[in-house]
Image (cartoon, grey):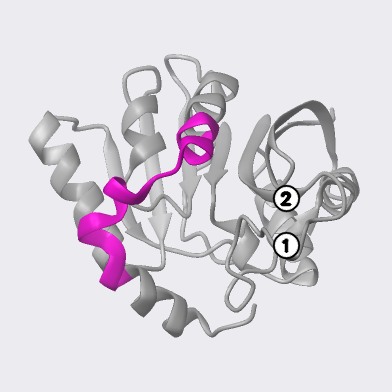
Amino acid sequence: MKRTREEHAARFDEKAADYDDTETDEYRTCVSLVVDHADPARDDVVLDLGCGTGAIALRLADAAARVVGRDISDGMLAEARRKAAERGVENVAFGPGTFREPAVEASVDVVVSNFAMHHLSDAEKRDAIAVIAELEPRRFVLGDVMFFGDPDPAEPFYSPEVDDPATVGVLADALTAAGFSLVAVERVHEQVGVLVAERRA
């Protein structure tokens, strides 16, 4: 991680109120793909790590029994709660948590994350995926900045001073090592994609 957790949280606190207005087409495509691939059953509990303003959690609430959103930014969580209240969505719970300390006590069936894990170093990503595996979800869907090839340093899709994206290969290896099987890869952009992993029996 190129900045401390507190620095990242403060940066997103500042962006929270206007965050939804700055979404790119690639981000919106990832949201839709993550929601589609999550495909929760009616009695499933879904965990959304790095939930931000609730873009995915709120869309999954109609299909799942319960959705738990975790984020490090109080400002983003406040926006997610505001949107849930506005829409009358009652089966979501937003609170503080991280990839390596998700603060979830009950079992979860599906874990999703979108545009959040790329803030971690590759070693931290491996640790995070191992923690997710310990929750024993049947499916993990990751939408994020990731490299399908060598990124053009003149046209990065991310902010090199604060972000640390991994290659698809690094992420696939981490998922496999944690006991998942990679079942789908969706390339949205040469630097953006969605990975779908299912827990091996």
In the rendered structure, the answer to whether residue 87 lies left or right of residue 146 reads: left
* Occupied quadrant, residue 155: bottom right
**Between 93 and 8, which is closer to the camera in this rendering?**
8
Q: In the rendered image, which quarter contains the N terminus?
A: bottom right
Image point (71%, 61%), residue name: 165
Image point (55%, 45%), residue name: 113
* Occupied quadrant, residue 193: top right
The residue labelled by disc 1 is: 125
- The circle on residue 146 is 2
Contact, CB < 8 Å: mark 1 with mark 2?
no
**Residue type indicated by callout 1:** Lys
127 versus 170 height, above or below: below
Image point (47%, 44%), residue name: 48
- Give the SS element for disc 2: strand
Task: Tell me which segment is drawn in magenta.
Answer: 13-30
Q: In the rendered image, which quarter contains the C terminus?
A: top right
**Residue type indicated by callout 2:** Met
**Between 176 and 131, which is closer to the camera in this rendering?**
176
In the rendered structure, the answer to whether residue 60 lies left or right of residue 157 reads: left
Measured as percent of width and height from the top left, residue 60 is found at 39, 26
